[in-house]
């Protein structure tokens, strides 16, 4: 059921910068409201996607924007996401976009590299953590409502910093949280024969076979799984959208997105817009990454590398 157009504004006497909720349906709004209420954040307004852009323009002070998507909002959704991306880049507020797997490609296509956390079918702890991180990164200090008035601001800050530190550490490709990412070794790949697609497929099959005998999350290695999937696709002359690459990572989609964003930022992957569909983005190996993979497989040709 579509949401009604009128904006539901909650009256509050706090002077703290509030949280705005925008949702694609009544069900999505209930989910977003539950996340905010359980975390004790003051909600200034709840609005359908169609009314969100106008409401944002009227908001004098804003700590965070939460966008909940469970269905396609079309052009109105694209406009709201584009507005949020621009304003988050400008530092006006922080934002979180919570979506479902079928909407992942259109969301990523619009948001691009904007500093916005994207959640995909996230559970309550992940949603609460994302909201805390967004609030802590906002340019204006955020106070809690009366429900959590007894919590000190310092405790919230420390909690948010710890959650952010853990998320960043998991998403880094370097050996430690305080090290800069290691660049891919640049080399001339002309003297290295390209790896065969069947070799890459065998490695992928061997990695997947482990889940028959051990818990799948025991061997979680999303960076390597994404590298292998992109290499296999390139050798097969296929293109890989963001949603498919997240599936190949064999971890929750939200985690895969963090890794993907990191690897794009580090120059390992590149985004390519789909010329036939403006709401889809492909991911490709950067040239140096492709060369490094070819050299890797050349060196381990006689070794069972899984």
Image: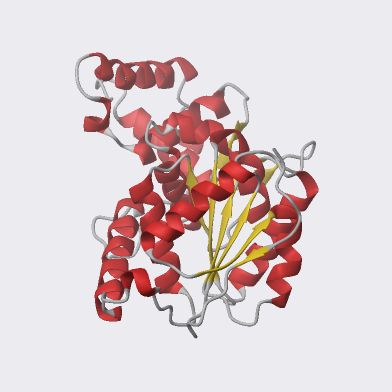
Looking at the picture, the colour scheme in use is: secondary structure
Image coordinates for residue 286, horizontal then vertical, percent: 54, 45
Q: Is residue 184 visible?
A: no
- Quick one: 104 or 18, which is closer to the camera? 18
Q: Residue at x 25, y 14 (%)?
A: 212
Q: Quadrant of residue 153?
A: bottom left
Relative side of 168 to 198, left or right: left
- Tell me: 215 left or right of 136: left
Q: Does residue 211 appear in the picture of this structure?
A: yes
Q: What is the x, y in percent for residue 296?
A: 35, 35
Residue most toward the bottom?
Answer: 15
Left or right relative to 241: residue 198: left
| Identity of the residue drawn at 57% across and 50% down | 29
Q: Quadrant of the C terminus?
A: top left
Q: Compared to 118, does 190 lie above or below?
A: above
215, above or below 176, in the image = above
Say how many tags the image has.
Answer: 0
């Amino acid at each position: 059921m579509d949401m009604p157009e009128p904006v539901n504004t909650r009256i509050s006497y706090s002077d703290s910068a509030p949280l705005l909720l925008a949702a694609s349906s009544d069900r999505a709004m209930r989910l977003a409201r539950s996340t905010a209420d359980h975390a004790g954040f003051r909600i200034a307004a709840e609005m359908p996607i169609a009314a969100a852009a106008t409401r944002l323009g009227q908001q004098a002070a804003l700590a965070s924007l939460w966008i909940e998507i469970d269905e396609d909002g079309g052009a109105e959704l694209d406009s709201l996401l584009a507005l949020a991306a621009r304003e988050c880049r400008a530092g006006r507020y922080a934002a979180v976009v919570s979506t479902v797997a079928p909407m992942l490609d259109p969301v990523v296509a619009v948001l691009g590299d904007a500093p916005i956390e994207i959640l995909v079918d996230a559970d309550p702890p992940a949603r609460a953590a994302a909201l805390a991180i967004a609030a802590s990164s906002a340019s204006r200090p955020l106070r809690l409502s009366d429900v959590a008035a007894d919590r000190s601001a310092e405790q919230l800050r420390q909690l948010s910093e710890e959650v952010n530190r853990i998320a960043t550490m998991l998403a880094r490709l370097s050996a430690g949280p305080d090290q800069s990412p290691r660049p891919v070794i640049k080399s001339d790949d002309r003297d290295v024969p390209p790896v065969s697609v069947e070799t890459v497929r065998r490695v992928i099959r061997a990695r997947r076979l482990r889940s028959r005998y051990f818990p799948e999350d025991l061997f979680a290695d999303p960076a390597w799984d994404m590298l292998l999937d992109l290499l296999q696709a390139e050798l097969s002359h296929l293109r890989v959208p963001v949603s498919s690459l997240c599936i190949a990572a064999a971890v929750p989609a939200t985690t895969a997105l963090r890794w993907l964003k990191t690897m794009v930022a580090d120059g390992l992957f590149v985004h390519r817009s789909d010329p036939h569909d403006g709401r889809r983005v492909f991911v490709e190996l950067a040239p140096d990454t492709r060369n490094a993979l070819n050299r890797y497989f050349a060196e381990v040709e006689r070794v069972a590398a899984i």
